[in-house]
Structures are given as C-alpha cells and as structure tokens.
Image: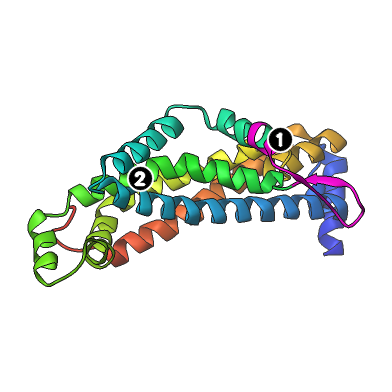
Amino acid sequence: MQAIAAWFRHFNETTGINLTIAYDPFDQARFLHGLLITLELSGVTIVASVLVGIVGAWLQGSSLTSTRRLVQGYIQLFRNTPPLVQMFFFYFGLSSLLPTIRNSFGIQEPLVSGFGWACISLTFFAGAFNVEIFRSGIEAIPQSTIEAAEALGYTRLQTYIYVVLPLATRVCLPALTNNLVNLVKTTTLAYAIAVPELLYVSNQIWSDSVNVPVMMVVLFIAYIALVGLLVFAMNSWERALRCPGLGT
C-alpha cells in the first residue's frame, strides 16, 4: 500500500492530477466513510420504499373510500413536490416540533438525526412512485386468477401476499428498477442537510485539496458503479423470476 501511495504522490508531482484519496489516509477515511453512508442510505430507502409501495398498493384496493383517498393523497403530495423541499420540510419543519435529547456530553441534540430524516424523506418520495408501480403490476394480473384464489378460501390479504404480489412483481420489475436507480441518485440530496454521504465528503476533500476536477471524475465513477451494481442485481432477479406468458 505504501508503494501505491508513493506512486500516486509522484503521479501528482509529475502530472498535477491530485488523487488524494489514493495516498492521504485522512482523505481515504473520509471518502470510505462517505461511501458507507451512501450505501446505508441507499439500502435503507430501497427496502423501506418497496415496502411502502407494497402496502400502499394493497390499501388502494380497500373497500373503504377514506383509505383509498388517503393513499391517493399521499401519492399526489409526494409525487408532485420536489424531493429537496420534502427533505427540508422534514428536517427543518417536523424536526423542530419534536423534543430534543442530551447526548453523552450533555449537549442537546435533535431526536431524529439528519441521516434519519433523509431516510424518511427519501422513503416517502420513492414509495409514492412504488405504490403506482405495484398497482400497475396488480392490474395486469387476470381477474380469473384472483377469483380462483378466492374460490380456494384465501382471504383478500392472503390472495394479495401469496398470489397477486408474486405475479405482479414479475410484471413491474423493469419500472421498479428505474425508480430505484433514480432513488440511489437522489440520495445526493442528503448533502443539503449535512448528511456526510459521498457528495458531502467529496466536497470537503476538494475544498481542502483544491482538486475539484479529479474528485468530480471519482464521484461520477463511484455512482456509475453503484447504479451498475443495482441494475445488475435487479436484472438478475428479473431473469430468475421470469414467467413465460406473464408481462411479455
């Protein structure tokens, strides 16, 4: 590792390309921490938003008009407002209404951290789209399939979990993949509320080392890699779940 660090120092001296994360331990630690936060933020919001989509799509089929209107209102609210505004609303608006807590040093801190609010905000934002994605998949399932499950004695919830949802997931995976890719890219908005994710720490590094072009290229490569891994995983899952004659 020392040899690699020495080579990058020499590379900087000879070319002016200052890739500090390759030879400076402090910048390396900051960058890896930011990458870890981005992965955690992406993972939490992907899982949570998919769950919101699944539950919301089921509630859309409720026999109660008030429930259906409530879900539709949620969808319209979060689909038609900017995600950055939503994040500011949660972080600066709702957070100020909650009580504070004292940390181990006796300093007052918000009850929910910036990372927590970023997760909540992005989950609701992506979840609104996921509800509609799962709804479209559900509508593609033949009514005769649902009637057959009901004839076997399945309840509405059992029909949804064991029959409708597995089939609908196969249909809506391409659209779901697109939304999750957009969600991973949207995690950069957490920068605005000081969550130390990849963009935030990269900004710190290029501010200290004045290597903006280099870190921008690194940032592009990092997000291309993250999105590429997600797309590969989702496409592999889609091929594994492919059902001839359904959604084709």
Residue 89 appears in the picture as rendered: yes
- Residue type beneath disc 1: Ser
Say few, some or many: other residues with alpha carbon within 10 Å of mark 1 (under 14 / 14 to 19 / 20 or more): few
Q: Which residue is mark 2?
A: 131
The mark that comes first in sequence, 1 or 2, is: 1
Residue 191 appears in the picture as rendered: no
- Residue at the limit of the structure toward the bottom, as seen here: 152
Say few, some or many: other residues with alpha carbon within 10 Å of mark 2 (under 14 / 14 to 19 / 20 or more): many
Q: Which residues are magenta?
A: 93-110
Q: Is residue 153 above or below residue 53?
A: below
Residue appearing at x 28%, y 45% in the figure: 60
Q: Nearer the viewer, residue 58 or 212?
A: 58
Quadrant occupied by the N terminus: bottom right
Residue appearing at x 76%, y 36% in the figure: 203
Q: Which residue is mark 1?
A: 96
Q: Is residue 241 above or below residue 24?
A: below
Q: Residue 190 location in percent, x, y?
A: 65, 39
Q: Residue 51 location in percent, x, y?
A: 42, 55
Q: Residue 88 location in percent, x, y?
A: 63, 31
Q: Nearer the viewer, residue 191 or 219?
A: 191
Mark 1 to mark 2: distance in Å? 29 Å
Dividing the picture into quadrants, the one containing residue 114 is top right
Residue appearing at x 85%, y 62% in the figure: 3
Whether residue 151 sits left or right of residue 73 in the image: it is: left
- Residue type beneath disc 2: Val
Report the colour scheme.
rainbow
Q: Nearer the viewer, mark 1 or mark 2?
A: 1
Taking the magenta stretch, the answer to whether it contains residue 145 is no
Whether residue 223 sits left or right of residue 109 in the image: it is: left
Residue appearing at x 32%, y 43% in the figure: 67
